[in-house]
Image: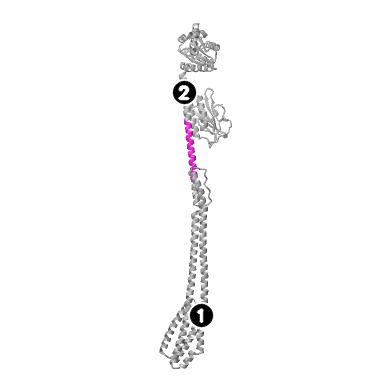
Amino acid sequence: MRLATITNWAYGVTVVLSLISGGTMLLASRAQTEERAAVAQRALLDRAAEKIVEQEGALSSLSRRFVIRGEARDMVIYQQTRQGLRSVEQRMRGMVDAGASAEELDALKAGMLAIDALRDEQQEAVAARQEGNKAFAVERLFGADYERDLDRATAQFDQFQYRLDQRTDAEVSRATDLSRLWRSVSEAALAVTAFLFLCVMYFIFRKRVIHPVVKLSDVVARLAAEDYAAIPPEFDHVDEIGDMAQAIRAFRDNGLARQRLELERSTDRAIRELLSRMTQRMQASDTFQDLKSVVECFIPEIAPAYAGRLYLLEETRQVMVEVGSWLSPAHSPPEFPPLSCWALRRGLPHRPDGDSIDIPCAHVGRQDRSVGAICLPLTSQRETLGLLYLERHHRAQSEAASEAYLTVLAENIALAIANLRLREALRAMAMADPLTGLANRRHLDDVLEAEIATAQQHSQPLSCLMIDVDHFKRFNDTHGHDAGDAVLREVASTLKDCVRDGGFAARVGGEEFLLLLPGLSMDQACERAELMRQRISDLKLRMEGRELGPITASFGVSSTPEICGPDKLLQTADAALLRAKAAGRDRVVCAEPRLAQARG
């Protein structure tokens, strides 16, 4: 019940009790008024009765004096007194008829009859005296009968006064008791009103106002300090305090919603900042190893609820190969064919769990949706570059990242991979010979410096082979430039095969090639050169249905630090090549320390 309702009820009851109290006080006052009226009526009737008795006595005296003296003046006084007694009797009868009891009326009537009888006797005596019969008149007024009638009239009026006194005393006593009763009721009503007021005040201000307000004020203070862990108390009664508690709960809910929104915004800003930083680092990566390091560093921070792998498409074998992983994923192998993944088939993100049911990918170890796997294809210009595979981490405590962020993440990684591939393609174009595919002279300078530094750091030998195709100009003039280009390509292919296990091949001139063989001594390099020479001489090329003839090459071999210093490595090998060409070509010439020093 609301406080307003309780207050209204209490106010209504208080008003009713106040009316009852006022009414009883009015009734008590009325009873007192009736008591006073009864006393006043009694006094009036008493005085009237006494006056009648007194005047009757006066009439008797006047009539007796007239009978004895016979003076006319006494007769006039007698007549006037008699006339006044009649008016008193009439008033007394009116007052008695208004409220007298039957006994009082009987006593009054008997008294009046006795008075009338006395008047008759007085009239007879007065008439006899006027006629001159004084003796009869005296006998009539002074006889025993007259005295007896006079005493009887006086006794009747005394009886009337006695009855009147009894009735008046009873009415006064009843009015007094009634007045006391109504006064007691009024006092009780006032006491109940005061008690009710105190109870209402105690109930409202202590039980329903003070205690709840103290609790609510503590909650409001904590909420004002943004301590939304404060829970407003529950009140079963529906009143203004309950409305306040409901409003405070709504305020707390709004505060929690704002706090969650701020947390989401902070998380969103943090993820966006991480994505921005990750994108910057990926764009600054020079190699796929750098890209792998960036991905493995940032993705666990952006999507901590997911373990995952980064796959790249190996075009030669047409398989997805893992190049990086984080948080130990357990349900996807390091390699799998692209057709095993529905995301790669459709070119769209694929997740078998969530709101929409979908088929799990075949490369996921467990063929159900409990893995929480997400496959995000890495594409650029409609070309598949790789795959970002994520699975729900079994120890994840944070909320999973939004799929929109994961999609943006995959797009950024795909863009970085595409940029790396484009950069590598441009670098290859800048550092490779377009005809043979071997490194050019610019690339050789960079690699030579790095290989020399590595060899010195690890105290390992570094050998160099200078190769020249024999009589290439004459061959080119005889068979044409296309045939010459074919010869260079085949020789380059042979050199590539010979350095697959380690080494570097470059084209340094028209028909001149160079090989760097790290870790091989002078003897090992000479053996490798002889093997290459043999393979080149075994080449059989045909063009337009005819053989191009034998192909041979001359080799000059040098090695550091066994033969020369690192700064003389190419010069020493070139000198050995010149000696091979001067000695008749199609042979391997190994540099000697003495000759190397002489050249130095």
Q: Label 2 crowding class (10 Å Cα cut-off): few <14, some 14-19, many 20+?
A: some
Can I make out residue 217 in this image?
yes
The kind of residue on which mark 2 rests is Arg
Q: Which coloring applies here?
A: one colour
Q: Position of residue 289 (x, y in %)?
A: 51, 24
Q: Which mark is residue 160?
A: 1
Q: Which residues are magenta?
A: 251-276
Among the two numbered marks 1 and 2 on one chain, the one whose residue lies closer to the N terminus: 1
* Labelled pair 1, 2 in contact (Cβ < 8 Å): no
Q: Is residue 339 above or below residue 588?
A: below
Q: Position of residue 29 (x, y in %)?
A: 48, 68
The residue indicated by pointer 2 is 423
Asked if the magenta segment contains residue 455, the reply would be: no
Q: Residue 492 or 293: which is nearer the viewer?
A: 293
Q: Which residue appears at 47% of the width and 91% of the height? A: 138
Query: Residue at the right extreme?
Result: 366
Q: Residue 579 or 16: which is nearer the viewer?
A: 16
Tag nearer the camera, 1 or 2: 1
Q: Residue 262 or 126: which is nearer the viewer?
A: 126
Asked if the magenta segment contains residue 270, the reply would be: yes
Can I make out residue 551 in this image?
no
Q: Position of residue 247 (x, y in %)?
A: 48, 47
* Predominant secondary structure, magenta span: helix
Element under disc 2: helix
Q: Is residue 280 above or below residue 178?
A: above
Q: Position of residue 445 (x, y in %)?
A: 47, 16
Q: Residue 572 or 212: which is nearer the viewer?
A: 212
The kind of residue on which mark 1 rests is Phe
- C-alpha separation, residue under disc 1 versus residue under disc 2: 145 Å
